[in-house]
Image (cartoon, rainbow, N blue to C red):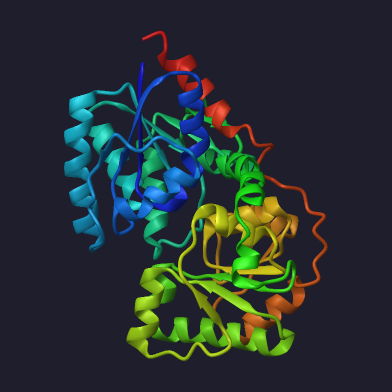
Amino acid sequence: MKIAIILGTRPEIIKMSPVIRECESRGLDYFVLHTGQHYSYNLDKIFFDELQLPQPRYNIDVGSGSHAEQTGKMMIGIENKIIQEHPDIVLVQGDTNSVLAGSIVAAKLHIDVGHVEAGLRSYDRSMPEEINRILSDHCADILFAPTERAQGILLNEGIEADKIFLTGNTIVDAVYQNVKVAEDSIDILKKLDLTKNRYFLVTVHRQENVDCYDKLYSIIKGMQLVHEKFSIPVIFPIHPRTKKQITTFGLNTEGIRLVEPLGFLEFLQLESNARLVMTDSGGAQEETCVLKVPCVTLRNNTERPETVEVGSNILAGVEEEAILSAVTVMINKENVWKNPFGVGQAGRKIVDIVIDKYAQR
C-alpha cells in the first residue's frame, strides 16, 4: 500500500500533520507532494521544521496566479508525480486549489481520493473554496467527515453512506500536539511585549475581503473602533496578500499593530493567550473553539457553523459598527462551550481506515 498526501498551503500542513505523523510512526509507504500554492515551498519549510515533519518528497512550486492558471499548473505537476509513484490512494485536505487539483488528477487516473475534512458547506458559491470542497467531495472515494453535521450534509447530497467516515477534525490533534511544544520552546508574548488576555488578535486573508476596497477599509475601521473602545493592543500578523492590498488601497492602519507573518507555534501561542480573535479564517474559528478563546468571524457565513452553535464564535460580517458590536458581545463570553470537533484522535482514525481498506490489496 502506498499513500500520497497532497498539500500546498500552511493550514493544510498543520491539519495534515497528525496524518503524516501517523504514517511516520507506523512506517507506512507514503510521500508528501507540496504544490507551493502559497507563494513558495521555500517559505513553508519552516512549518515542516517547526512541526517536526519530514520534508516533502516533491514540490512543484506553482506560486500565485489566477485560479485557472494555478490549478492547471498544479494538475500538470501532480499528474506527473502520481503516474511516477502510482499510489493506492491520494489524500487531500480542505478546500484549496491544491485539493481540487489533486482530487481531479487522481480521479482521472482511477486512483482513489480520500478527502480529509469533507462535508463542510458555507452555501456561498461566490467563494472559490465552496466550489473546491463540493467538487472534491464528489470526486472522493473516502470522505472523512469532521462532525455529524458534515456527515449529514454529505448524505443529503447523495453520497453513499459506506464512503463516509466520522473521524473528528485533525485540527484538534494538531492543537493538542503543539500547544505544549509552543509553551516550552518559544515566548512570543515576551518578544512582542504583550500580556496574556490583554490584546486582540486579528487575521484577514480571504480574497473576497482583501481584494475589495470597501470591505478591507471597513474591516480595518472596525479594528480601530475596537482598539478605541477597549484600549488594548490589536495585533495583526499580516498576510502578504493583505499587506499588498493595504498598500495599494492606501489604507490607514493607525491603532493596529501590524507584525510580520508568524510560524505556527508562535501563532498558536499568541492565539491561545488572546482576549479575543477577529478572523476570516475557517481554521482560526476551529482553533479558538478548541483553545477556549472567543472568536468574531469577519464574514457573513461560515462552513464551521458548529462554532456558532456552541457559542465560541459569532458572525459579524465586515461592517465596522457590526464588528465593534460583535466584539462587545463576545469579549466577556464565558469559555464553557463544548468542543464539537472531537478528542484529538482524527489522524489515527483516518490512517486506521486507510489501512483497513487498502493494506490487503
**Relative depth, front residue between 265 and 100:** 265
Residue 68 % position (x, y): 21, 57
Q: Nearer the viewer, residue 248 or 163?
A: 248
Question: Considering only vertical position in the picture, is 122 above or below 259?
Answer: above
Q: Residue lying farthest top?
A: 360
Quarter of the figure with residue 49: top left
Q: Nearer the viewer, residue 234 or 312?
A: 234
Residue appearing at x 46%, y 71% in the figure: 238
Question: In the depicted view, which residue is nearer to us: 160 or 25?
Answer: 25
User: Can residue 253 be spotted in the picture?
Assistant: yes
Question: Who's the residue at 54% across and 73% down the image?
Answer: 236
Q: Which residue is located at x 23 percent, y 56 percent?
A: 70
Q: Position of residue 357 (x, y in %)?
A: 45, 16
Residue 334 in which image quadrant:
bottom right
Q: Is residue 165 left or right of residue 23?
A: right
The percent position of residue 91, horizontal first and vertical second, equals 39, 33
Q: Quadrant location of residue 232? A: bottom right
